[in-house]
Image: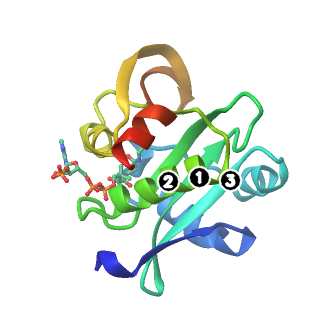
Amino acid sequence: MGTTFHLVRGGLDDLPFIMATERLEGYDRLVGRWDEQRHRDAFVDGSHAYFIGYDGPAPVGFAMLRFWNAVERTTLVRRVAVVSPGQGQGRRLLAAVVAHAFRETDVHRLVIGLFPDNLRARRMYEAIGFKAEGISRGSAYFGGEYRDELAMSLLRPEWEAANA
Ligand SMILES: CC(C)(COP(=O)(O)OP(=O)(O)OC[C@H]1O[C@@H](n2cnc3c(N)ncnc32)[C@H](O)[C@@H]1OP(=O)(O)O)[C@@H](O)C(=O)NCCC(=O)NCCS
């Protein structure tokens, strides 16, 4: 299964897959979902980058990053979702995205904000090397309310040491 995994930079053609995946049942309380225009704006704003993970010919999930290749050298992993959770696909997808970011850009710090009760996501990020930093109070305006997020980050030296 894992041997055929590969990562592709997402484009407008991937929008139906991206929008269907972020709308999967049960994901509404875990991850944001945008309408088509917001995604289209993000595709051309010069700051967002989308990646699609494939296991063989089938897309298995996507990741959306913000401040991609930014001069500040901090990139935000803004959204990650897979079609079939709990099978290691998220870990493969994000590990590939992280490797791509450190190899292809000068980024020093990758950061993610997740809801603190999303233990499945936290476990995946920790497996890739992200470390919990603390709670960002009220940092996500989500479903009409401000929710706390757990900030997790991965720094280039840590990643390079683990992937030498
Ligand atoms: C978060 C997400 C991308 C992770 O991808 P995934 O393919 O499910 O993750 P993996 O299977 O690679 O790893 C999940 C890990 O969490 C563990 N896990 C699963 N459910 C869990 C739970 N309820 N509590 C704690 N750990 C859990 C699994 O055992 C696995 O750890 P292990 O490999 O050490 O056994 C995926 O679950 C998803 O799309 N979720 C919905 C959207 C979402 O939450 N996105 C993240 C927003 S920040």
Position above or below: 159 against 22: above
Which label lies toward us, 1 or 3? 1
Residue 63 spot, x, y in % from top left:
53, 55
Q: Amino acid at mark 2?
A: Ala
Q: Secondary structure at mark 3?
A: strand
User: How far, Cα to Cα, is label 1 from label 3?
Assistant: 15 Å
- Label drawn at residue 99: 2
Residue at 71% in and 48% down? 48
Q: Which comes sooner in the sequence, label 1 or label 3?
A: 3
Q: Amino acid at mark 3?
A: Ala
State the residue lying farthest toward the top. 137
Mark 3 burial class by Cα count in 10 Å: few <14, some 14-19, many 20+: many
* Residue 135 can be seen in this image: yes
Q: Which quadrant, please, contains the N terminus? A: bottom left
- Label drawn at residue 103: 1
Residues marked 1 and 2 touching at CB (< 8 Å): yes
Q: Secondary structure at mark 1?
A: helix
User: How far, Cα to Cα, is label 2 from label 3?
Assistant: 14 Å
Mark 1 burial class by Cα count in 10 Å: few <14, some 14-19, many 20+: few
User: How far, Cα to Cα, is label 1 from label 2?
Assistant: 6 Å
Residue 105 spot, x, y in % from top left:
67, 47
